[in-house]
Amino acid sequence: METRLLPTDPKDALHESVREAVRILEGGDVVALPTETVYGLAGDVTSPDAINRIFEAKERPAFDPLIVHLPKRDQLGEVADVEPALEKPLRRLMEAFWPGPLTFILPKQPSVSDAITAGLPTVAVRMSSHPVIKRVLHELGRPLAAPSANRFGRISPTSAAAAQEELQGRIPLILDGGACSAGLESTIIRLEAAEPKPIIHILRQGPVTADQLKKFGKIAKKKKPRRETDAEAAATDTSPQPPMEAPGQTASHYAPRTPFRLLTSPADFSPEAGKRYALLSYRGEAKDGYLDLADFEEISILSPGSGKVPEAAVRLFFLMRQLDQLGVDEIIAEPVPEHGIGAAIMERLRRAAAEPRQSA
Ligand code: AMP
Ligand code: MG
């Protein structure tokens, strides 16, 4: 299959490209398009063919559910069923963060297929602020299921070129909307009714930080993340299982092909003779103690100059992809400060460094 790449700039091009995307989506096929977090692979929620194609193109296992994107806030009721006690806190959060990189896990409407939710009674819902997906949703008028536009277990694409690298020949169309402004996947939360404030469970860290969320509720203490082996067991074991809080949040994820090591202390490293290394540095400063650890073939800097974590977030997946293409023997990553969006970056780095498992 030929994968076409269409521009969304200038305005005329946007109009034409959106029209083509909507035509394809109405025909039950899939389109990769930009959101503010990462590129998504979108299909009409009401089309079983489109949902199948998303799983096929991504080689995504059926136990990993998709995120649903809404055209308008008042279409939430089409996919989710909100308990009365949560209506007010949910509305406050939606008003504060939508459109934006925050996903809610809510009880699903019966019309949402089990394929989308991987058989769960809940559905993940989001409203993106990116003008391209907003236009497509507006013209289609129906919600889209859109997980990240990468093959399962791989680095999420933050540019059209990266989406092309992942899905070339597998899908008919990619809309090029430039680089993603947040650069990390959405924050995923679940709300639990409580007085005086709801409890907020953060299932996946992301651009909306715990600090920003805490005035809307009590942030629940983190549970230990479930490991991929648990997911594999859950997929094959038919005995009753406790529900998985965050399916898809498996230990080995975001995996570059090159071995990847998160080096929390430079003292823990000595280079092996003959091995070729690259460094993913936080701010590229010698005083951090990493630059001279080896004769690095390449040093990529997440936040050049000032060392700011939001800048590091935007560049993280892009630089990981670039380093992965060098063909070195190992990529060494420096830690970043674990505050604000730095917590989400560290989570991605830990997953990238986790031992790859068979199914990833
Ligand atoms: P992606 O957009 O590719 O990052 O994938 C969507 C992710 O959202 C999945 O991997 C899950 O971690 C999460 N997700 C989607 N639906 C649910 C759900 N019903 N309950 C919990 N997590 C979900
Ligand atoms: Mg993903």
Image (cartoon, helix red, strand yellow):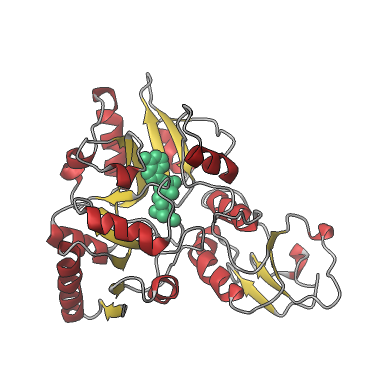
Seen in the picture, residue 292 relative to 93 is either above or below; the reply is below
Relative depth, front residue between 137 and 144: 144
| Residue at image location 21% in from the left, 35% down from the top | 110
- Where, by quadrant of the figure, is residue 13 drawn? bottom left
Question: In the displayed structure, does residue 238 sit left or right of residue 322?
Answer: left
Does residue 208 appear anywhere in the picture?
Answer: no
- The spot of residue 303 in percent (x, y) is 58, 67
- The spot of residue 127 in percent (x, y) is 28, 51
Relative depth, front residue between 57 and 211: 57
- The spot of residue 189 in percent (x, y) is 41, 39
Seen in the picture, residue 158 relative to 11 is either above or below; the reply is above
> Ligand 2, what quadrant?
bottom left
| Residue at image location 86% in from the left, 75% down from the top | 273
Does residue 94 appear anywhere in the picture?
Answer: yes
What quarter of the picture does the N terminus occupy? bottom left
What quarter of the picture does the C terminus occupy? bottom right
Question: In the displayed structure, does residue 268 sit left or right of residue 356?
Answer: right
- The spot of residue 257 in percent (x, y) is 60, 68
Relative depth, front residue between 140 and 314: 140
